[in-house]
Image (cartoon, helix red, strand yellow):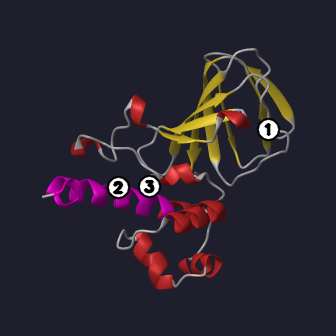
Amino acid sequence: MSDLASPTARTLQGADERVLAGDIRALRRVRGLTLAEIALKLGRSVGWVSQVERGLSTPSLSDLRAFAELFGVPISLFFSHDVPVESERGVVVRAGKRRTLGTSESGLVEELLSPDLGGSFEMVRSVFAPGAELKSEARRPTEEAGYIASGQFDIEIAGAWHRLGEGDSFRFEGKPYRWRNPGSEPAVVIWVVSPPVY
């Protein structure tokens, strides 16, 4: 019997599909989109989108690219890592098994600390390269908080800049913001966003 046909492989594959389905459903909901709107934008049927969200259909790689573009997230978000202990799935994220978002070329690399996007918030470890900055103001319909684990981090919230260092934290809701790393070392920020946007 091949590994793909083994009961363990089927269980893990089914669990990965449930995580993917839950993430797609959470992303659609937080963006306020209906199944019909998603189907129209993707050129697919409402039934197919519903099956994907319930884990009954597995989207192809090109479908995942389309979902990523539609939601404005990196495609890497949709690829979960192995969780060797089934009881940890959806509960524990091991340090070496985080989903990575972004690339070092962008100046920002983020790792999803939350097991999935199905809860009321997400937790992300963000590493900002020296000199990296968000030049254009961003604004999301979310409540956000951050804790500076190391380095220096500047954040502008509603037009006011704040210089933060290791151990400092911040919170804001629905306000325009920008950020930059003014230091010569990477800045590591643990970022919490509610509802999840990745």
Above or below — where is 6 with respect to 109?
A: below
Q: Residue at x 72, y 37 (%)?
A: 106
Report how far apart the C-alphas of labels 3 and 2 lie in the structure: 13 Å
User: Magenta region: which residues?
Assistant: 2-24
Q: Position of residue 193 (x, y in %)?
A: 58, 44
Q: Amino acid at mark 3?
A: Gly
Q: Amino acid at mark 2?
A: Asp
Q: Position of residue 175 (x, y in %)?
A: 76, 46
Q: Residue at x 52, y 50 (%)?
A: 77
- In this view, the residue in front, 178 or 158, is 178
Q: Position of residue 33 (x, y in %)?
A: 61, 72
Q: Quadrant of residue 152?
A: top right
Is 153 positioned to the left or the right of 79 in the image? right
Residue 134 marker? 1
Nearer-N-terminus badge (3/2): 2
Q: Residues within 10 Å of mark 1 (few under 14, many from 20)?
A: some
Nearer-N-terminus badge (1/3): 3
Nearer-N-terminus badge (1/2): 2
Q: Nearer the viewer, mark 3 or mark 2?
A: 2
Which residue matches tag 3? 118
Q: Amino acid at mark 1?
A: Leu
Residue 16 marker? 2
Residue furthest to the left: 1
Local secondary structure at mark 3: loop
Report how far apart the C-alphas of labels 1 and 2 lie in the structure: 33 Å
